[in-house]
Image: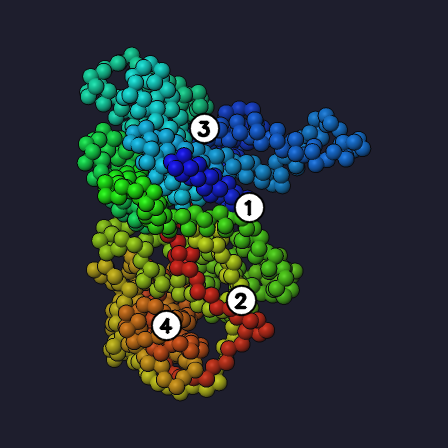
């Protein structure tokens, strides 16, 4: 039975890692440190290659591994495949069996490396998937070595099905190699404790060095250090010559891998210093986001709780050495990424932590198994209970990993978009689109889709656009602020993504509104990230008739408008004066801060029309200020709490030119909406002072013209609109 389970786990691990490599995830810029640097080592014939801009900031192990696989396997295989597909040309003499040097170089560049040198990218990803698969095997070996076959099997399954590890195995980034070599290092370091021979000390140092040379991280040094200390103080084996041999092998492999890091030490220092600055090294401030991410996504809530049970199990078994050993990469990783630096923002750095948390999870499940084993004597029945329990515990991870392979079997979204646009958008159309959106349409006019210039339907229309295309890889950049190590007040109020605040940011409102006028959506499941694109038709609004419902004169008071979106902040920039409702020019942490109207019940109206007098003042030129928006709700309770909004309509932003203007906002009322509120906020709270003098609400008869386009409103996935990590990677 255990052998069958073992092979089943390996088959699943292999399939989860190999399927979807091609087409896979679009090119990740950081993959250059692996495949591009490895390819450069081959073409430049040196370890001092220049395939990646920050080659000296990272060790050479991963690019060397890539170079070896390319040189010994992928390039020979590609040459063989090239000639195999051209046998008729060889027979006819059109192609020579031994081409000239010039022809060889041409074939190598065009056919072996592929268009734009794309083939090495996929070779590298296959290499990464191999090491991801190897990590599953190593987890079984280590789990069996220090505990039991059962623990090894459970941990191997958790590793096999781990969504983050499956995703990491589809990109040629150093992180999956980091997991592989850290587990391998622990296996060989443990040999010091079990059998303190000179060979074991030598190999322990060697593999600790290999692990260190993946990302210059010291987890393997801590692990081997714990084994040294155990050998010296618990087993009373000093073995100083052996320890020196181990240290020597560690230093030797590091030197062999990175000779030019020493030779070019100034460049190495500069690049490592830059990366350290980027990661915020030395900040020494509690950073809750990495812990949140591990809890909800990288490990998953059920598995995290199982890991606590696993810790209890190890203590109960009095295996304190293994408790310290397994905790060491977890605690040192949390110290590094959740306190000493901001590196936890890049969640792929957390894979080594999640790997060993999953070992504790496996121990927790095994603890339950051992308890059930004492109660249930029928082994077949026992297994029949335990396996469904494990599957239920890890269901979300299993489904997420499956979504990765299913989504990555499909063409890149950007190519799907190009094809759709070329067939469906008329020639000469005026399209609001960021420069990173492809527009393969004849005589197309590209207009601004920029955060500080033009970002909403009314602003696009004002600029003359008839269509807009939102690229979420760029348009969602303003939604990462909550991940950025914001301070303890936030951490005391949220151990989750603050969706209720993000929904009321300017960009959140604008993208929600745009999606209601969508004519096309291309998107992956958020667990298999690729760029989401929304194509929208810009509507024309025509006012037929209106009748006033209510008039707010803010020169006489707040008229029941309340402060909202302040959350945990002690202060805000919202105030009242005889001028009207004010949004002062003050640094405000939360972009959801706003004035909000009383709730209005919608009666006998198909449309609305809002007219208001506003001014935005700033010393900075060409800056945007105040805007209003109308939120619609199904019931009174939702409207009062500003949750479960069913639709939203957003005004253009007022230019901060110190000129009073009377503006308007109109639109249709959704059929399922019964209540509405009006929000008043500022795009730039730091540099603009905004005044709302009065506001009138009308029920109205409105015509909305989308031309000949058929609108297909989309409800954006909350994890796609508001990512759980940077790019959901």
Looking at marks 2 and 4 on the same chain, the residue that comes earlier in the sequence is marked by: 2
Q: Residues within 10 Å of mark 3 (few under 14, many from 20)?
A: many
Looking at marks 3 and 1 on the same chain, the residue that comes earlier in the sequence is marked by: 1
Relative to 34, residue 729 above or below = below
**How far is the residue under mark 1 from the one under mark 4?**
40 Å
Q: Residues within 10 Å of mark 4 (few under 14, many from 20)?
A: many
Horizontal and vertical percent position of residue 246: 33, 18
Q: Secondary structure at mark 2?
A: strand
Please state which of residues 542 and 714 is positioned toward the viewer in this rendering.
714
> Outermost residue toward the front?
378
In front of the other: label 3 or label 1?
1
Mark 3 sits on what residue? Answer: 60
Identify the residue shown where x is 43% and y is 43%: 166
Marks 2/4 in contact by CB < 8 Å: the verdict is no
Circle number at residue 519: 2
Marks 1/4 in contact by CB < 8 Å: the verdict is no
Horizontal and vertical percent position of residue 240: 26, 13
Circle number at residue 631: 4
């Amino acid at each position: 039975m255990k052998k069958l389970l073992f092979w089943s786990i390996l088959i699943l691990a292999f399939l989860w890692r190999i399927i979807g490599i091609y087409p896979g995830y679009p090119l990740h810029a950081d993959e250059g440190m692996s495949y591009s640097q490895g390819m450069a080592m081959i073409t430049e014939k040196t370890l001092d290659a220049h395939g990646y801009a920050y080659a000296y900031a990272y060790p050479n192990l991963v690019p060397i591994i890539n170079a070896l696989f390319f040189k010994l396997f992928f390039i020979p295989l590609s040459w063989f495949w090239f000639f195999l597909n051209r046998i008729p040309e060889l027979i006819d003499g059109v192609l020579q069996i031994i081409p000239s040097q010039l022809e060889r170089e041409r074939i190598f560049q065009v056919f072996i490396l592929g268009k734009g040198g794309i083939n090495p990218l996929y070779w590298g990803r296959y290499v990464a998937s191999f090491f991801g698969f190897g990590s599953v095997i190593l987890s079984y070996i280590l789990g069996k070595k220090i505990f039991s076959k059962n623990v090894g099997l459970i941990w191997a399954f958790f590793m096999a099905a781990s969504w983050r590890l499956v995703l990491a195995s589809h990109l040629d980034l150093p992180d999956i190699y980091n997991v592989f070599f850290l587990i391998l290092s622990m296996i060989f370091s443990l040999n010091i404790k079990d059998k303190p021979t000179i060979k074991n000390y030598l190999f322990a140092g060697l593999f600790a060095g290999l692990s260190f040379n993946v990302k210059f991280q010291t987890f393997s040094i801590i692990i081997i250090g714990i084994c040294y200390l155990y050998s010296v103080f618990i087993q009373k084996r000093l073995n100083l010559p052996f320890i020196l041999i181990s240290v020597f092998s560690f230093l030797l492999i590091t030197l062999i891998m990175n000779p030019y890091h020493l030779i070019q030490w100034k460049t190495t220092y500069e690049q490592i210093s830059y990366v350290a600055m980027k990661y915020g090294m030395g900040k020494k401030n509690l950073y809750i986001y990495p812990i949140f991410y591990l809890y909800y996504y990288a490990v998953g809530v059920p598995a995290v709780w199982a890991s606590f049970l696993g810790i209890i199990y190890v203590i109960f078994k009095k295996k304190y050495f293994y408790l310290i050993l397994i905790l060491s990469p977890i605690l040192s990783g949390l110290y590094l990424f959740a306190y000493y630096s901001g590196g936890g923002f890049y969640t792929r750095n957390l894979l080594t932590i999640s790997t060993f948390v999953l070992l504790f999870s496996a121990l927790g499940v095994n603890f339950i198994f051992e308890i059930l084993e004492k109660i249930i004597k029928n082994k077949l029945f026992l297994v029949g209970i335990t396996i469904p329990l494990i599957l239920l515990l890890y269901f979300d991870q299993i489904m997420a990993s499956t979504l990765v392979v299913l989504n990555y079997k499909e063409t890149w979204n950007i190519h799907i978009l190009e094809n759709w646009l070329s067939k469906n958008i008329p020639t000469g159309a005026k399209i609001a689109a960021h420069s990173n959106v492809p527009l393969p349409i004849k005589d197309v006019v590209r207009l601004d889709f920029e955060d500080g210039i033009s970002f909403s339907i009314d602003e696009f229309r004002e600029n003359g656009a008839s269509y807009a295309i939102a690229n979420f890889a760029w348009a969602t950049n303003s939604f990462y602020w909550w991940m950025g190590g914001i301070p303890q007040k936030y951490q005391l109020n949220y151990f989750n993504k603050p969706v209720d605040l993000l929904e009321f940011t300017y960009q959140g409102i604008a993208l929600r509104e745009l999606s209601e006028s969508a004519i096309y959506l291309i998107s992956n499941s958020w667990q298999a990230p690729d760029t989401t694109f929304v194509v929208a038709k810009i509507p024309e609004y025509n006012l037929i008739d209106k009748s006033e419902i209510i008039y707010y004169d803010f020169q006489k008071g707040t008229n029941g408008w309340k402060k909202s979106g302040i959350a945990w902040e002690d202060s805000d920039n919202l105030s009242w004066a005889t001028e009207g409702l004010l949004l002062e020019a003050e640094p405000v942490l939360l972009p959801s801060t706003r004035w909000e109207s009383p709730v209005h019940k919608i009666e006998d109206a198909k449309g609305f029309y809002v007219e208001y007098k506003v001014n935005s003042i700033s010393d900075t030129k060409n800056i945007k200020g105040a805007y209003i928006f109308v939120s619609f709700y199904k019931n009174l309770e939702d409207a009062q709490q500003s949750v479960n909004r069913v639709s939203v309509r957003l005004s253009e932003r007022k230019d901060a030119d110190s000129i009073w203007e009377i503006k308007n906002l109109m639109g249709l009322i959704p059929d399922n909406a019964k209540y509405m509120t009006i929000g008043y906020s500022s795009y730039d709270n730091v540099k603009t002072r905004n005044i709302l003098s009065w506001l009138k609400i009308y029920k109205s008869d409105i015509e909305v013209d989308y031309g000949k386009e058929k609108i297909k409103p989309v409800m954006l996935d909350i994890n796609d609109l508001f990512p759980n990590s940077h790019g959901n990677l």
